Amino acid sequence: MDESRRPTSIALGSSQDRTTDSHLCVEVIRSKSSLTPRVGIILGTGLGEFAETLEERVEFAYAEIPGFPVPSAAGHRGRLILGKIGRVDVAVLQGRCHLYEGRAYEEVCHPVRTLHRLGVSSLITTCAAGGLATDLRVGDLLVLQDHVNLQFRRSVNFTNGFQFPYCERTSEKLLEIMRKQDIPGRLGSYLAVTGPNYETRAELRFFRRIADSIGMSTIPEVLTAHQLGMSVASLATITNVCNPDQAIVADCDHVIAAAAETAPRVRRLITTFLENGLCRSDTMSPVTASQTLK
């Protein structure tokens, strides 16, 4: 699950304000880089090291970019990095803001809208998550096929539907690479809560019935990207096992450390995926539950 929580002020803005901010963001970014990224990557807790491996890197602190919220949670550096993975131009968000930080929904989604305006058409999100399903272990990767949104906040601007926001073809390719690289994991579902508190035992018993993993991020970005017509794939790295029958208290430092342990395999997976060709069009149909790793 996601991480350290320190509330910050809420800054609300109109739709016109957000559009203006996105234009200003692109102007700032274009002033320092001529790269045209088609792929965006959001790095969750403990996974920021991935961005350090990009070639031809150009870095921006979120504070330099108009309207970008600066993360206050541990494990989120708050930088946009443009660069290359092989021949692919990418834009990497090194950390994210969460609703529990006191941010408005549209603030959390603003970086995704900026990536779209930059030309990004495919988005890969990553996050740290607690394992609800009994077969999951720390270090496993879930390729998300669906989610349960219990954050109770949605954009009012969805018009094209979002029942199946996760790209089926992309998920299949990621699973195939995981098999070849002996990366433990499978397809699964993700349940998002607002936080900042972790769950009670009773809540965990209930949540186990409806999802495989749990966290406090990802869904706002996924829904926004899908609304904008972007192809979306999401990876959740299991950083702690949520067992309501064991008195194990979730700890922020442990979550960050566990995520960092999985960072090399996440980097290897995404790098191989991009080097072998990204899914550029799909039907947005749901992935079948039978497509799991054995």
Image (cartoon, helix red, strand yellow):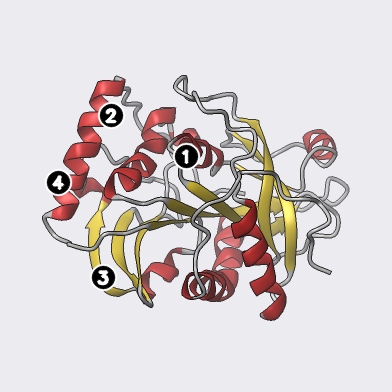
Residue receiving disc 4: 27
The mark nearer the N terminus, 4 or 1, is 4
From the top left corner, tell me how far across and down residue 107 is, in percent: 36, 33
Amino acid under label 3? Arg
From the top left corner, tell me how far across and down residue 202 is, in percent: 83, 34
Amino acid under label 1? His
Residue receiving disc 1: 98
Residue receiving disc 2: 18
Residue 290, numbered circle: none
Dot 3 falls on a residue whose secondary structure is: strand
Viewer-proximal residue among 243 and 66? 66
Viewer-proximal residue among 195 and 190? 190
| Distance (Cα) linking label 3 and label 4 | 18 Å
Which marked residue is nearer to the observer: mark 2 or mark 1? 2
Amino acid under label 2? Arg
Amino acid under label 4? Glu
Count residues near mark 4 (Cα–Cα under 10 Å), then give few for <14, some for 14-19, many for 20+. some
Q: Which quadrant holds residue 67?
A: top left
Residues tagged 4 and 1 counted as in contact (Cβ below 8 A): no
The mark nearer the N terminus, 4 or 2, is 2
From the top left corner, tell me how far across and down residue 168 is, in percent: 65, 52
Count residues near mark 2 (Cα–Cα under 10 Å), then give few for <14, some for 14-19, many for 20+. some
Q: Is residue 107 left or right of residue 251?
A: left
| Distance (Cα) linking label 4 and label 2 | 14 Å
Q: Is residue 231 above or below residue 142?
A: above
| Distance (Cα) linking label 1 and label 3 | 26 Å
Count residues near mark 3 (Cα–Cα under 10 Å), then give few for <14, some for 14-19, many for 20+. some
Residue receiving disc 3: 57
Which marked residue is nearer to the observer: mark 1 or mark 3? 3
